[in-house]
Amino acid sequence: MRRKLNSGFTLVEMIITIVIIGVGLAGVLTAFTTVIKSSADPMVRKQLISLAEGMAEEITQKPYAIGSGTITGCNRSSADDVRDYKTAYAAEQNICLPDGTSAGLTGYTIKVEMDDPATWNGIPNTIKIKVIAARGSDSFSVTTWRTDFAS
């Protein structure tokens, strides 16, 4: 007599397979959700870096000698020396273009900390400038120095 071989899965094997696949998928989906939630972080970081570096460059391109211009509100078009930014951006300000119009970056702020002229590394008349761009709990700062290299 020959025995007939049964092929296929039993109900218990199918249930165990479904449970194992379900647990695996739940873990994978949880990992994807975490990655997707934090995927905007690199973009925010790049924007903070760009904002801080841009403002630091704008400040250091201004003349060292004190001029008569001032920054009114967010309008920086009349700024004519490095020190104009010290009082205008002593507290966090919203991001705007140099002419005072909105840059459309809600939630982003920028702040400038500036030391009085001093001697740094043997170089007289040096101003230390720190620009801090922030959004929520994220922030990025750039520190640079501006000297009176003309004199």
Image: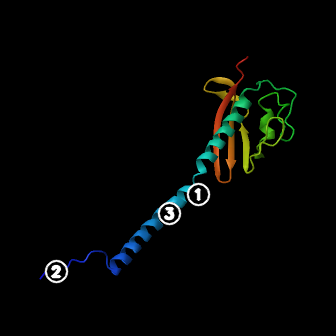
- Residue occupied by mark 1: 37
Q: Residue at x 83, y 40 (%)?
A: 101
Q: Nearer the viewer, residue 135 or 85?
A: 135
In front: label 3 or label 1: 3
Amino acid identity at mark 1: Lys
Secondary element at tag 2: loop
What residue would you read off at disc 3?
29
Q: Nearer the viewer, residue 64 or 94?
A: 94
Q: Is 95 drawn above or below residue 128 in the view shown? A: below
Tell me: residue 12, above or below residue 97: below
Q: Which structural element holds mark 1?
A: helix
Question: Mark 2 and mark 3 in contact (Cβ < 8 Å)?
Answer: no
Total numbered badges shown on the rendered structure: 3
Left or right, 74 with respect to 143, comes to right
The image position of residue 97, as x and y in percent, is 79, 38
Quarter holding the N terminus is bottom left
* Disc 2 from disc 1: Cα separation: 58 Å
Three-letter code for the amino acid on which mark 3 is drawn: Leu
Earlier-in-chain disc, 2 versus 1: 2
Q: Are marks 2 and 1 in contact (CB under 8 Å)?
A: no
Q: Which residue is mark 2?
A: 3
Quick one: quadrant of the C terminus? top right
Could one spot residue 105 in this view of the protein?
yes
What is the secondary structure assignment of the residue under circle 3? helix
Q: Residue at the location (50% across, 64% down)?
A: 30
- Establish if 1 lies above or below 69: below
Residue 85, quarter of the rendered image:
top right
Q: What is the C-alpha distance between the residues marked 3 and 1?
A: 12 Å
Marks 3 and 2 sit apart, C-alpha to C-alpha, by 45 Å
